[in-house]
Image (cartoon, rainbow, N blue to C red):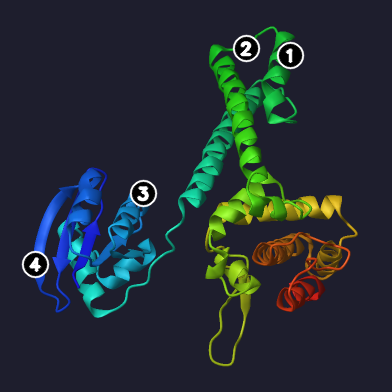
Amino acid sequence: MDHIAIDLGGRESQICVRRSDGEITEELRYATRNLPAWLKRRAKGRVILETSAEAFGVADAAVAAGHEVRIVPGHLVRTLGVGARGIKTDKRDARALSEVSCRIDLPSVHLPTHLSRRYKALCGARDTLVETRTKCINGVHSWLRTQLTNVRSGQSKRFPDRVRSKLLNEESGMPSFVDGQLTVVDEMSKQIAIYDQEIEHAAKNDEICRRLMTVPGVGPITSLRFRAALDDIARFEGAHAVGAYLGLTPGEDSSSERKRRTKITKAGPSRVRRVLVQASWTLIRTRPNDPIVQWATAVAHRRGHRVAVVALARKLAGVLYAIWRDGSSYDPAHGQVPHAGEEVKDELASLVGSAAP
């Protein structure tokens, strides 16, 4: 079997092909956009890629052509010899990846489905606009402070109207650069509203997202983010594996007889972790009598509210995982999913009844 390592670039990619015995049989540079056709013509082998913007598209083409695919995580490639001794070129990188592939079965990230990628792209587009709008609003706030005045934040989409109303009564009026920022905020708010409608439509038409949204505090964005991040529920052995994947489990710093738990690892998709924390705050405010919220309240009394909210986010991720896996909806009356199998019932009972954060 040939080991085909491709160091991907935006326009051109470097390819190194080795036989199983490690001998290089082919090296070339090739236009990245033509790689699907090139892979289709080749005999089936193992294609090795490093995670990048182009990796999933090339991986799709390789799988369609019958190749075995390995997408190596970016944080691991240096340990495999890429960039060794401070020398990093496309040719050396491709050689290093193909050489290692001949010796070991390389680890690979999950190749997400097209639906998962679409959901991530949609939520990511919204996040980009929200973050840019926030920067514009903060910029206007900073200028207002230099004028010894201020305008309450409130809803972001109403902010331009509040600023304009405030400055109409000021003798100095409003500079053009401030008006320009407010115009940008107006336009972004309109586009964000359009994205919100698209996200809501996608979530309502996705059977898994509809069930996830039966959990209080979980709306279209949270369900879509969670759905896209996990993608294939069979990848995870249980709720703890999901929490670890999302970076919501405590780390550990142990040596010899000393054992110490640290803060959460914050590994994995940060935006999913963030929306789960936001969902936890919403759940605490809106459903104080829910069993899982009562558990979080007990944690808050011992460890503080911030620790409790993160712990609740981890439990919430476990509940969402179990609901997805079982195909049922949230039922707070019993602290479990209705009509669940015994394994899932036991898991949810432990999630709600556990006393450790």
Mark drawn on residue 174: 2
Q: Nearer the viewer, mark 4 or mark 1?
A: 4
Give, as a three-letter code, the residue at label 1: Ser
Q: Are marks 4 and 1 in contact (CB under 8 Å)?
A: no
Q: Label 1: how many residues lie within 10 Å, few (<14), some (14-19) or many (20+)? A: few
Which residue is labeled 1 in the image? 165
At x 71% / y 9%, what residue is drawn? 168
At x 63% / y 24%, what residue is drawn? 146
Q: Are marks 2 and 3 in contact (CB under 8 Å)?
A: no
Q: Spatial distance from mark 4 to mark 1, Cα to Cα? A: 72 Å
Q: Earlier in the sequence, mark 4 or mark 2?
A: 4
Q: Quadrant of the C terminus?
A: bottom right
Q: Is residue 140 above or below residue 130?
A: above
Residue 205: where, in percent of width, then height?
64, 44
Which residue is labeled 4 in the image? 25
Badge count: 4
Give, as a three-letter code, the residue at label 4: Thr
Mark drawn on residue 126: none
Q: Is residue 151 left or right of 274 when viewed as pictured?
A: right
At x 84% / y 51%, what residue is drawn? 285
Residue 247: where, in percent of width, then height?
58, 65
Mark drawn on residue 53: 3
Q: Spatial distance from mark 4 to mark 2, Cα to Cα? A: 68 Å
Q: Earlier in the sequence, mark 4 or mark 1?
A: 4
Does residue 142 show up? Answer: no
Give, as a three-letter code, the residue at label 2: Met
Q: Earlier in the sequence, mark 2 or mark 1?
A: 1
